[in-house]
Amino acid sequence: MIPVLEIGGTHVTAALVEPRDGRVLDRTRMPLDAHGSAEEILGTVHDCAATLVVPSGARWGVAVPGPFDYAGGIALFAGVGKFDALYGVDVGAALRGGLRRHPADVVFLNDAHAFLAGEWSAGAARGHRRVVGITLGTGVGSAFLADGHMCEYGPGVPPEGRMDLTEVGDEPLEDVVSRRAILLRYGDPALDVHDIAERARAGEGRALRVLGNAFSTLGAVLGPRLVAFGATALVVGGSMARSWDLVAPALTSGLEAGGWVPDAGDAPRGPVSPETAAATRHTRAVKPARLAGDAALIGAARAAADGD
C-alpha cells in the first residue's frame, strides 16, 4: 500500500492506496484554509497524514496544484488566490521532517496530472490512447496524456500543459471559467456555485446564462487543442463536474464550435490492440470523472510506486 496526500484549495486528503487495482483505504479528509499561514497549512497537512498507519521509510505520493516545483518540492504559489503563505517554502523538506514516521521520499505531482493518471488507469479514460483531463473548481486544472505519459509540449498542448496559462480574448481563461469568475459574473456574494446551479435547474435565466457562457467558452478554447492533440476523450472532474447535467450541454456546444465534435461511441476498456485502436480512432467522447475523489489519490500512488 502506498501512502498519499491530495492537497487542494479547500481540503487535504490522506489515504492508503493499492496502485495495481486502485483500491483506496483508510481515507481521511480535513478542511484546509488556503489563506492561512504556512505553519497553519502545513500543520493541517501533517495532522491529516498522521491519521494513516504507515511505517517509517515509506515513499509518499503527493498531489498538489501549481504553480509548484514538483521535482524540488518547492511551492511557487503567487497571484493564484491560494497558498500565498507557502511561496518559496520547501514543502518536501517540511513533509520529510514533519511527518511522525519519516518517509524515505516524497514524490510530488500536479493534481490535474494525478487526476488524469487515475482516470486513465482505472476510470473514465481507460482504453483511450490520447486523452485530456480538465478539473473545474477554484481554478482550471488540465492534463494532456498520450500512451500513459503526460505531455507538456507538442501539438495542441498549452505551455507546460496548463490551460490556466491560456487566454480568452484579452483575459486569462480562469477569469471566465473558475469559481471566482462565475460568482463575480453572477453578482450575488451570498451564493456559491452550487447555489447558482440549483437556480439554473429551476430555470432562472441569469444562472443559465452565466454557467452556459463559462462552460461553452471553455469548450470553444479546448476544441482546437483537442483536434491538434488527437484526443479521443475529454474527462472532466473537480467540484463543478458534480453538476454534469449543466456542464455537459454547454461544454459540448463549445467543443463543437471549436471543431472537436463528440460522437456517441466510446473507446473499448482494457488493453487496446492496434487493430482495435484503428477501428475506433475517430471516437470522441466527453465524460465526467468516474472515480470522483479517488482519481488523484490513485494517480499519486502510481507516481510514488513508479518513482516518477
Image (cartoon, rainbow, N blue to C red):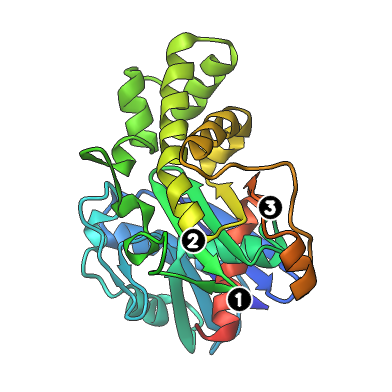
Return the disc, 3 or 1, that comes first in the chain's sequence: 3
Count every numbered label the image shows and give the total. 3
Q: Secondary structure at mark 3?
A: loop
**In the drawing, does residue 188 fall left or right of residue 242?**
left
Image spot of residue 242 (x, y percent): 60, 37
Q: As rendered, which of 146 and 72 lies closer to the eye? A: 146
The type of residue carrying mark 1 is Arg
- The residue indicated by pointer 3 is 283
Helix, strand, or loop for circle 2?
helix
- Cα distance between the residues tagged 2 and 1: 24 Å
Whole-percent x, y for residue 108 in the image: 44, 74
Residue in the image at 36% along x and 27% along y = 183
> Do labels 2 and 3 touch, CB within 8 Å?
no
N-terminal of the two: label 2 or label 3?
2
The residue to which callout 2 is attached is 229
Sequence order check, earlier mark of 2 and 1: 2
Compared with 266, 104 (above or below) is below
Residue placed at 29% from the left, 62% from the top? 39
Q: CA distance from mark 2 to mark 3?
A: 14 Å
Residue underneath mark 1? 302
Q: Residues within 10 Å of mark 2 (few under 14, many from 20)?
A: many
| Residue type at numbered disc 3 | Thr
Graded by Cα atoms within 10 Å as few (under 14), some (14 to 19) or many (20 or more), the crowding at tag 3 reads some
Asked whether disc 2 touches disc 1, contact meaning CB atoms under 8 Å apart, the reply is no
* Position of the N terminus by quadrant: bottom right
Q: Is residue 274 above or below residue 39?
A: below
Residue 260 vertical position relative to residue 116 in the rendered view, above or below? above
